[in-house]
Image: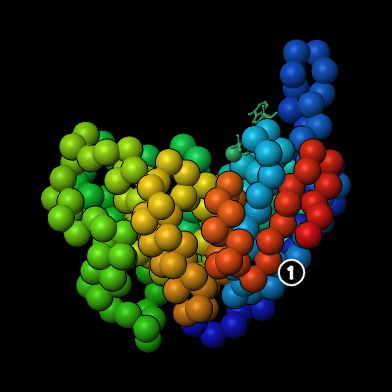
Amino acid sequence: MAADNTLDISIKNIKKKYKRGKRDNVVLDNVSLDIPYGKFVVISGDSGAGKSTLLNIASGLSKPSSGSVFYGNKDITKLSDEELSSFRNNHLGIVTQESDLISYLTLSENLKISCLINKVPDDESFDGDELFSLITDELGLTALKDELPCNMSGGEIKRAAIARALVTKPKVIIMDEPTANLDRGNVRSVLKLLRKFCDLGSTVIISSHESEAIDFADINLKLDYTELGA
Ligand SMILES: Nc1ncnc2c1ncn2[C@@H]1O[C@H](COP(=O)(O)OP(=O)(O)OP(=O)(O)O)[C@@H](O)[C@H]1O
Ligand SMILES: [Mg+2]
C-alpha cells in the first residue's frame, strides 16, 4: 500500500468528560497526538487511564467533549453519523474491548460478512483467499473455520475478532487490547501479524499492557490521567 497522507492522524486538544454522579469525571484533558501514516503505535497506561476512551474517539466511535481528530485535513468529529460510518467502513479495521462475533454465523461467515460490509479494495499484496489463509493460519484459527462462536474459547473469539478486522485489509487498524487474555504464544502471533500489516503499509494503533508490545512498535505512548507523555 502506498503512503497515504490523507490518513495521517492528528488528534488536537481532546477533552473527554463523563458524568459521575453529579460531578464531571475528566478522563482526557487536552490530549494532542500526531500519528503519521504507516506507523505502529502502542498506547499503555493504568486501568482507567483513558486508553479505550482515546481509541474510541480516534476511530470515531465516540465524540470528544471538545477538540478535533483529523485524518489528513478531514476532521472526523465534524462528520454526520452516516459519513462517519462510511469513513470507518472504507478505511478502518477496529477491535474494541468488547468486540464479539455474530453468534449465529461460523468463523468463516463472520470474516466474509466483514468483507461484504466494508468495501475491500484491490491490493497487489494478497488476493482475498491468500489473505484469509494467512490471517487464519497465523492466528491459529484454520481448524475453527466452520465453528460457531459458542463452540470457541474466549481467546479464540478474541483472535477471531482480530482476524475479522484484518481481512478487509484496512489502511488504519485500531485495536483496544488485542492481546488481553491470550497466552504468551498467541500474544506474540498477534503482535507479529500486526507488525506484518504495518510493514505492508497500514497504520496500527493498539492499547496493550504487554511489555513485549513495545518491541514491535515505532511509537510508544504512556497515557496518564491528565497527559500523554512519550
Ligand atoms: N461510558 C462511560 N461513562 C462514564 N464513565 C466512563 C465511561 N467509559 C469510561 N468511563 C470512565 O472513564 C475512565 C477511563 O476509562 P477507559 O475505559 O478509557 O480506561 P482504560 O485506560 O481503557 O482502562 P482499562 O485498562 O481498564 O481498559 C474510567 O474512570 C471509567 O470509569
Ligand atoms: Mg480499556
Whether residue 41 sits left or right of residue 157 in the image: it is: right
The spot of residue 108 in percent (x, y) is 21, 55
Q: Which three-letter amino acid code belongs to the residue tagged 1?
A: Asn
- Determine the residue positioned at 37% across, 69% down: 120
**Percent position (x, y) of residue 85?**
52, 52
Q: Quadrant of the C terminus?
A: bottom right
Ligand 2 appears in which quadrant? top right
Residue 102 versus residue 55: which sits nearer the camera? 55
Whether residue 127 is visible here, answered yes or no, is: yes
Residue 71: quarter of image: bottom right
Seen in the image, is 68 located left or right of residue 151? right
Colouring used for the render: rainbow
Q: Which residue is mark 1?
A: 73
Please, is residue 39 above or below residue 41 in the view? below
Q: Secondary structure at mark 1?
A: loop
For residue 213, what is the image quadrant?
Answer: bottom right
Q: From the Cβ of disc 1, is ligand 1 less than 8 Å away? A: no
Q: In this rendering, is residue 229 above or below 201?
A: above
Q: Residue furthest top?
A: 21
Residue at image x 32%, y 80%?
126
Q: Is residue 104 above or below residue 81?
A: above
Asked whether 118 or 150 is in front, the reply is: 150
Q: Would residue 115 be seen by someone viewing this image from the given angle?
A: no
- Which residue lies at the image location 61% right of the left edge and 61% below the top edge? 214
* 214 lies above or below 105: below
Where is residue 35 shown, x and y percent of the image?
A: 70, 67
Residue at image location 25% in from the left, 75% down from the top: 130
Q: Callout 1: few (<14), some (14-19), or many (20+) C-alpha neighbours within 10 Å?
A: few
Horizontally, residue 178 falls left or right of residue 68, namely left
Q: Position of residue 138 (x, y in %)?
A: 31, 65
Of residues 179 and 123, which is closer to you in this image?
Answer: 179
